Amino acid sequence: MVIKTLDLFAGIGGIRLGFERAGFKTIFANDNDKTCKETYDLNFEEPKLLIQDIWKIYIKEIPDFDVLLAGFPCQAFSIAGNQIGFKDEEKGGNLFFKIVQVLRIKKPQAFMLENVKNLKSHYNGRTFIIIKNNLERLGYYVKAEVLNSITHGNIPQNRERIFIVGFLDKKKAEAFKFPKEIPLTKNFKEFISNEADEKYYYNNKPLYEKLKNNINSEDTVYQWRRRYVRANKKGVVPTLTANMGTGGHNVPIIKNHKGIRKLTPKECFLLQGFPKNFKIPQIADSYLYHQVGNTVTVSVVQRIAEEMKKVLML
């Protein structure tokens, strides 16, 4: 039995990759970010990424599918954003309601949505209640849980995200369980190269003077937080964010035998669970940092997909 998925707000395909590893088949993919298409199409066969405003997609023309997947825009709900939520049209806060439209018209067996942890507490929890109520009105039985890449993906990145899963079949929903915690067996150094291009080093650059006295361990990952250096004391990488690379802000920083440098885009992809053979296009690093900060940790999504597949095959 082939279980078909719809990949909305697809980005660079992190959710697709996790589900395809679990045996699902993607039949349609959409995003509105043109730079993502280069990365997505470089790594996936058909379907390629359709770049189009989702409001302009005629839902009845979308091929039939079994599971809707969507990492819908999170900036409107993020602590790092303005937290306006559904009212924030510029940041895509109202795009959740397009997902509702697709579910109402196409009625797939199940869905999986992903967003920032803060979605659950946004507006004193009322935003999440609105989301859950809208999904349940369509006949879905809904479960949600916050998972961390450290505890659920065996990836040394402190990344907490909420995953919302729903099924039309009540028995399937009751049978579904989110993956359990697993031990973290990997160190961030396993994802880091000994050598990197000179452009990633801060040595002899203006910011170096502000960094050199506070970055002194090769066993710690640091961040430049506009005015100060923050050490991640857990020995893991801090959350990779979509605004990494804008003015040097937020990109994780390490010290090695050559000096002090930021993580490269390739290293960030690996720290999101993407395989070593995942191809990275020749585009500006600022785009790549944005893409990798916006995507999901693949291994976490794969584990959710495997649990969903178990109940969908019942």
Image (cartoon, rainbow, N blue to C red):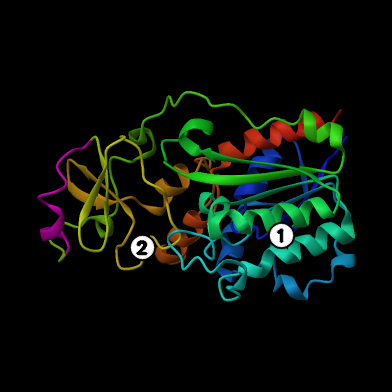
Q: Are marks 2 and 1 in contact (CB under 8 Å)?
A: no
Would residue 63 be seen by someone viewing this image from the given angle? no
Say which residue appears at 29% left-offset and 54% top-offset. Answer: 197
* The stretch drawn in magenta includes residue 208: yes
Residue range (magenta): 207-218
254 left or right of 303 in image: left
Q: Secondary structure at mark 2?
A: loop
Relative image position of residue 47 (x, y in whole percent): 75, 56
Label 2: which residue? 245
158 left or right of 214 in image: right
- Camera-side residue: 268 or 174? 174
173 left or right of 84 in image: right
Of the residues under marks 2 and 1, which one precedes in the sequence? 1
Relative image position of residue 21 (x, y in whole percent): 67, 37
| Quarter of the picture holding the C terminus | top right
Looking at the rendered structure, the kind of residue marked 1 is Lys
63 left or right of 228 in image: right
User: Majority secondary structure of the magenta segment?
Assistant: loop
Residue 221: quadrant of the picture: top left
* The stretch drawn in magenta includes residue 7: no
Would residue 82 be seen by someone viewing this image from the given angle? yes
Mark 2 vs mark 1, foreground winner is 2
Q: Secondary structure at mark 1?
A: loop
